[in-house]
Image (cartoon, rainbow, N blue to C red):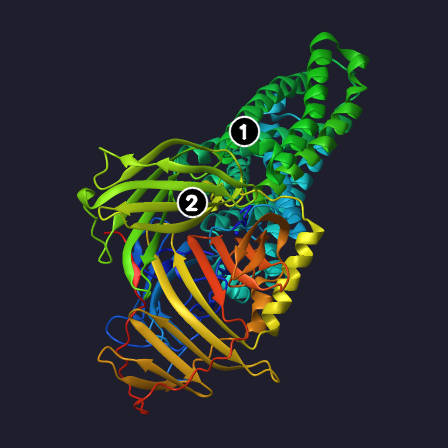
Amino acid sequence: MGHHQTRRFLAFLIPLLLLATLVFAPGVEAHAELVKADPAVNGLVAASPAQLHLWFSESLVFNDRTPTVQVLDDKGREIKVTKVSVDPNNDREMIVDLPSFGPGTYTVKWTNQSKDDGHVLSGAYAFRVGGGLPAGAATTVGQTPAAWAVALRWLTYLGAALALGGFFFTLIVLPGGAASTAGNRRRNIAILAGAAVALVATVLEPVLQTFFPPEGLTGGFLDLVRGQPTAWWLRPGALIPLVILAIVLVGPLRGRLPQPLAWLGAALAAIAILGLALTSHASGRATWRDVAVLVDVLHQWSTALWVGGLAHLALWWPARAAAEGETPTETLPLRRFSAIALCLFAVAVASGVGNAAFILPALSSLWSSDYGYVLIAKGVVLLIPFGLAAYHHRTISRAVGTALHALHRTVRVEAIVVLAVVLGGSVLALSAPPVISKAPLDNVQLVEPVLDAQGNTQANIHLTVDPAKPGTNAVDLRVTDQNGKPVPADKMRRLWADFASLSYGTVRDNVEATADPAKPDSYAINGLDLSLEGWWRVTAHVMMSDFSTMSADFYLMLPDPNVNGFDAPPKPKNDPEAQALYEHALKQLASLHSLKFTQAIGSGQDVLVTAHLAITIDPKTGQTTASSLDSPNYHSISVGQKSWLKQEGGGWLEQPSNLLPPLSSWVDTYGGGTNVRFGIKEMMGGEEAQIVTFYLPEKPSQAEAWFAWWIGTKTGRLYQMTMTADQHYMVETHSDFNGNFTISPPPGAAFHSGPDLRAVRPSAVGRG
């Protein structure tokens, strides 16, 4: 969400089981994927929800293994759910009963089994309970905070600062608390006005949040009030008695301010400002929180004393006793405030720098994020009151009498400019600070099967690339049998690899891999320089002891987004000719009436799932008429309104229809690509194929992804695609375009249905 914001609370995939990384894969829906959730994915709720609702793309099996749900708080502690069930009226909906819990960010980890195809999937997403989040705050990087929220926070701070400054001015600045009657009256009216404005602005926050809720925030007014940050209650808790005290000062006391009441009022105003500080970014830190909060509180208090004192200095000036002239006694408050203001300014600047150091993840964030731009602008504007304050201090220390008379104009200018500085602080407090997103993987670990002529797995080749970005990389190869056990070294004569950039062609061939003494059963290629960005193909070769050779192709993006961050991959300028070919291929896909394709989907963590699929389309309606999904341990067939699933014993079990979506839906799935560029040309299916690479931005229920397509230059057929997304690596090959084949019900199928589906997962190749 991140940026992204933003980016991104955005797709959260955790591979709990072998298929866990397949949840948000773009492509044909062949699994029970999460469609939506309530609370929403990356959403906000005002208060602790009583239930979670998760809707999936397929019907769910309810047994002793699935579905399961875990809810974790932001420290990884499990919130014990009270019940997990499937809605009896909608077997695609999972319902989770929850206990009550406090504000914060929570992660939901789920596992299910599809009743339609038997696949077991897992995934995760996050949502946030509104407590701890100031009203109208930006929740993702780059998002603009609500204008009304900035205005209310600004008014709250200025009002509380005006009240605090009034008590501070009386107790510290005025000699013995002496002031004219008119000055006392002005001061107390200003204190009342400041406290009242701060209280009204505070109360308006949940009111306006009800009318202008952030995206995904649910709940009524009372929920929003209950869901306010804990520290938020310090503000009305301090401002209500402060308003009452100010009314007493203006009314019954008629301007008099006894010292005990002055100290009480100062404490209440300081507590109100503390309530603002404790809803800042510092209070949300996981580390050094106490120190960060202390620095931010010092910044808020010192700035408030400076701003409020400056305002009361401007109010005091016209009301001072002028009859005696500009005597040293009369100018003593001015001199005293000048000295104190310099100290407050120094504390405010030092604590402000410290606060920024805690918030900014890197110095470069200053000139590479919206948050940094506002911070720089605030610093530039701050130079104006700093210059005026220095000028005032210098003038006051050297002159008396009429020379000081003209200063009241520049003091007022200083006070007005400070309002802009405080406004910048309010924007920063509600803006999501920049983050350096941590990539989900430490390196890329891919696995590919090597098949014989009958399509049976002979062996598996595993490839690890680190750090998976342009430049010098360490490449490791491992060979395992179909059961995942390492092939002994004496069974292999040689391992080597070819490296080709899909944008520029062959770069290096026949690069030898040697046994790595530090990693048993691993063969290393060290110091390999892969200097080009973009898509690469690594072809790994193994010569066995009988001189037979096995090969496997791996496709990866450099820099890999899962290792180096999702902003790392290149985004070249769009090529109109490449864009036209890409769109032509999309149209060709949508026009097909039959197709066979093979999917190999990996997690980047040495996990692979393969499946063979076929689909036929009614040329008149464009709807799917039949489809099949086949893997070594799993086979389903759908024809019309009936589907059959092959059981472990070999029989077929009838199920509700599970037709794959029509090929026309692929236009929505794969459409909207940007940064489309040509790569090299290769032969595919007896035709010259042009490689086209592109980036597909994030879509609802679909993560951002990077693609390379092999498109026939004459026919526009999409022969092959490879994709990298969030912990998701896919290679898909297409054949039998508009082929004259049929998908028939299984011979001898037992056309009955039963409540207990003993389905199995597709075969998976994993660590071993």
**Residue for point 48% across, 58% down:** 227
Residue for badge 2: 538
Q: Looking at the image, can residue 365 be seen?
A: yes
Distance between mark 1 and mark 2 Cα atoms: 37 Å
Q: Using a 10 Å C-alpha cutoff, classify the residue at mark 1 as few (fewer than 14 neighbours), some (14 to 19) or many (20 or more).
A: few
Which residue is found at the position 38% from the left and 54% from the top? Answer: 603
Classify mark 2: helix, strand or loop: strand
Q: Answer whether residue 698 is visible to the viewer in this image.
A: no
Q: Is residue 65 left or right of residue 684?
A: left
- Figure check: 572 above or below 690: above
Most extreme residue toward the front is 547
- Under mark 2, the amino acid is Val
**Which residue is under mark 1?**
363
Q: Pick whichever, 438 or 339, lies toward us.
A: 438
Q: Nearer the viewer, residue 135 or 571?
A: 571
Can you give x and y, in whole percent of width and height, for residue 434 in the image? 54, 40
Q: Position of residue 48 (x, y in %)?
A: 42, 62
Circle nearer the N terminus (1, 2)? 1
Q: Amino acid at mark 1?
A: Leu
Q: Is residue 740 above or below residue 213?
A: below
The residue positioned farthest toward the bottom in the image shown: 751
Question: Farthest top residue?
Answer: 398
Q: Residue at x 33, y 80 (%)?
A: 645
Q: Nearer the viewer, residue 316 or 374?
A: 374
SS for callout 1: helix
- Tell me if mark 2 has few (under 14), some (14-19) or many (20+) residues whose alpha carbon lies within 10 angstroms of its own: some
Residue 411 percent across, percent down from the top left? 74, 25
Residue placed most toward the observer, 374 or 111: 111
